[in-house]
């Protein structure tokens, strides 16, 4: 680490990167569905802030617009849609069944974060840009941890949040390496993400109405009488 | 040389004098947030005054450990105080007597004797609380170690004064993901070690649920006062490490004159006031964890601290 003066915006971006990693861990560690959703909103808000900061320091109007899109899509639209489509008893549930218990999940998430640093270390070293060196490993760690919660969670809503968290991680790495990506591509992704939330939300709502659970693990067989799963 | 010894004494007096005030402000604010009026912020001083003027009752079954422990618990935070920057940002006379690990060991020594004393009386609640404190302690220990190792890896030193200088001198190290991960891990650690709310309820009076508090149940009079005061000082010392060494290494005096050192006192108090507000927000918005969830809480702190270590190693290599 060199002793040169760091621009404040990029310095704050580095601190936010740490918070994004923590919120990724928090999503793995939280039991309540409500809590998982809240941490996702927090992570998205941090992501938008990071996008504003980098946009400000690089004078990139794209990144500023991207920050607004993130706030609109992930902090407002997705929570609202998920609240509206899913019945409230989904959120009242406390314990989410997981394949592994929470301490081992956290350890695995840590291993994934270490792996991300190992993989990205040589790549990020090529560039001397501090933003890339900060964002790339933590973005990749976000992708891997989101993918892990997609595997380990047993309920539909946290799995959806896992997908969205993967997207968040990719986004965080993306704003560092390709800040001048055409806005249309980002818009498409943002709308895509909202659409995923709508589709999964409606699907889960229907499944919950039919068989009273949101756990895909119980949906292994196709059967006529829904009573079998109750 | 003599002057820095004097400043060290001023730091000790600061910690001794303001530790009860810190506890008082914290409990007052917390009550206010819960829309109660709350005790006066000077109440801890009055409690100490009252306890010092009461007779002490010591069970005839106890040994010297029970008698010696209050003094040890009172003195140990003072040893740590002489190692850390409380008011000045340049090393004082005793700064190189020990590093952060020594500070950790000192605090652990106090905790160890407090646990022994709790077992010593034969009161059933004492050993129960003591064993719980040990459980929290041994889960917190690795986090302490890794936080210290990471900090010393970044600063190339384990002396708290030099670490503090490093954050001021090198914004690149200050503004790094590792730094904020360290901060969060250490904050969780302070909550666990200080017996604050997600881990333990400091205002609870129900013996079966106590963790930290039950060690002092058997003490009366002067012993109880020293145990209480020592606990408050330990919390203030941990807060000073967190604020002055890790979170906000500004506001410490750089001047060599006595006036400068005294002028740093209000700055540090303002910093602590902000920290009190954050603590009140944490304590009022969370519920106490069940006993076996504490391992998850500290496990999360461990994960975060290891992530900080990894991030700092890789960003250091790059």
Image: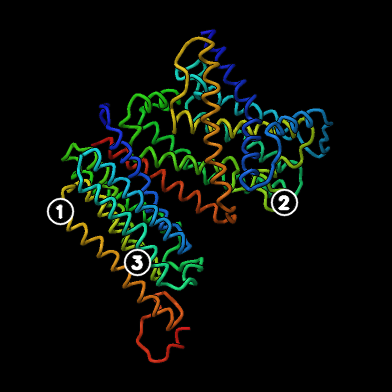
Q: Residue at x 44, y 30 (%)?
A: B248
Q: Which residue is mark 2?
A: B206
Q: Check disc 1 and report its element: helix, strand or loop.
A: loop
Nearer to us of marks 3 and 2 is 3
The subunit letter for the residue under badge 3 reads: A
Q: Are marks 3 and 2 in contact (CB under 8 Å)?
A: no
Residue B163 at what x, y percent from top left? Answer: 41, 27
Q: Residues within 10 Å of mark 1 (few under 14, many from 20)?
A: few
The subunit letter for the residue under badge 1 reads: A
Q: Residue at x 68, y 43 (%)?
A: B213
Q: Is residue A177 above or below residue B265?
A: below
Residue A195 at what x, y percent from top left? Answer: 28, 68
Q: Which residue is mark 3?
A: A160
**If you read the primary sequence from the N terminus, does the residue marked by circle 3 or circle 1 appear first?**
3
Q: Which residue is mark 1?
A: A182
Nearer to us of marks 3 and 1 is 1
Q: Check disc 2 and report its element: helix, strand or loop.
A: loop
- Quarter placement of the C terminus of chain B: top left
Residue B312 at what x, y percent from top left? Answer: 32, 38
């Amino acid at each position: 680490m060199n002793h040169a003066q760091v621009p404040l915006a990029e310095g704050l971006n580095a601190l936010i990167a740490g918070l994004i990693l923590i919120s990724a861990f928090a999503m793995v560690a939280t039991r309540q569905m409500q809590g998982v959703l809240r941490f996702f909103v927090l992570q998205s808000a941090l992501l938008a802030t990071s996008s504003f900061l980098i946009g400000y320091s690089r004078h990139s109007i794209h990144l500023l617009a991207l920050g607004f899109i993130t706030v609109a899509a992930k902090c407002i639209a997705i929570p609202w849609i998920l609240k509206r489509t899913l019945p409230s008893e989904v959120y009242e549930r406390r314990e989410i069944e997981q394949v592994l218990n929470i301490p081992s999940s956290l350890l695995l998430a840590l291993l994934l974060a270490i792996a991300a640093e190992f993989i990205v270390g040589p790549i990020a070293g090529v560039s001397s840009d501090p933003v890339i060196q900060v964002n790339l490993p933590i973005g990749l760690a976000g992708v891997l941890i989101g993918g892990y919660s997609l595997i380990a969670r047993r309920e539909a809503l946290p799995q959806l949040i896992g997908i969205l968290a993967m997207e968040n991680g990719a986004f965080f790495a993306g704003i560092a390496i390709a800040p001048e990506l055409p806005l249309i591509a980002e818009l498409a992704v943002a709308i895509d993400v909202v659409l995923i939330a709508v589709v999964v939300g409606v699907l889960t709502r229907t499944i919950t109405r039919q068989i009273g659970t949101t756990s895909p693990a119980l949906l292994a067989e196709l059967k006529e009488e829904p009573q079998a799963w109750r | 040389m003599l002057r820095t010894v004097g400043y060290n004494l001023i730091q000790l007096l600061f910690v001794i004098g303001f530790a009860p005030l810190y506890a008082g402000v914290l409990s007052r604010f917390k009550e206010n947030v819960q829309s109660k009026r709350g005790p006066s912020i000077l109440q801890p001083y009055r409690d100490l005054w009252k306890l010092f003027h009461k007779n002490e009752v010591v069970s005839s079954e106890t040994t010297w450990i029970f008698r010696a422990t209050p003094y040890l618990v009172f003195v140990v935070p003072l040893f740590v105080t002489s190692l850390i920057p409380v008011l000045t940002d340049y090393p004082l006379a005793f700064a190189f007597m020990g590093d952060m690990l020594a500070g950790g060991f000192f605090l652990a020594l106090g905790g160890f004797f407090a646990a022994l004393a709790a077992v010593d009386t034969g009161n059933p609640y004492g050993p129960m609380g003591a064993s719980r404190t040990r459980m929290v302690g041994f889960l917190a220990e690795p986090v302490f170690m890794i936080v210290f190792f990471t900090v010393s890896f970044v600063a190339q030193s384990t002396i708290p004064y030099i670490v503090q200088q490093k954050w001021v001198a090198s914004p690149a190290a200050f503004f790094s993901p590792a730094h904020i991960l360290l901060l969060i891990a250490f904050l969780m650690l302070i909550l666990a070690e200080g017996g604050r709310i997600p881990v333990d309820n400091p205002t609870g009076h129900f013996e079966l649920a106590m963790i930290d508090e039950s060690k002092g149940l058997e003490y009366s009079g002067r012993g109880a006062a020293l145990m209480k005061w020592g606990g408050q000082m330990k919390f203030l010392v941990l807060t000073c490490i967190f604020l002055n060494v890790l979170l906000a290494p500004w506001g410490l005096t750089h001047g060599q004159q006595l006036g400068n050192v005294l002028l740093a006192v209000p700055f540090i108090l303002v910093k602590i006031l902000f920290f009190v507000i954050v603590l009140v927000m944490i304590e009022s918005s969370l519920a106490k964890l069940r006993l076996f969830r504490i391992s998850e809480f500290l496990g999360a702190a461990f994960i975060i601290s290891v992530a900080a270590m990894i991030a700092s190693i890789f960003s250091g290599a790059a």
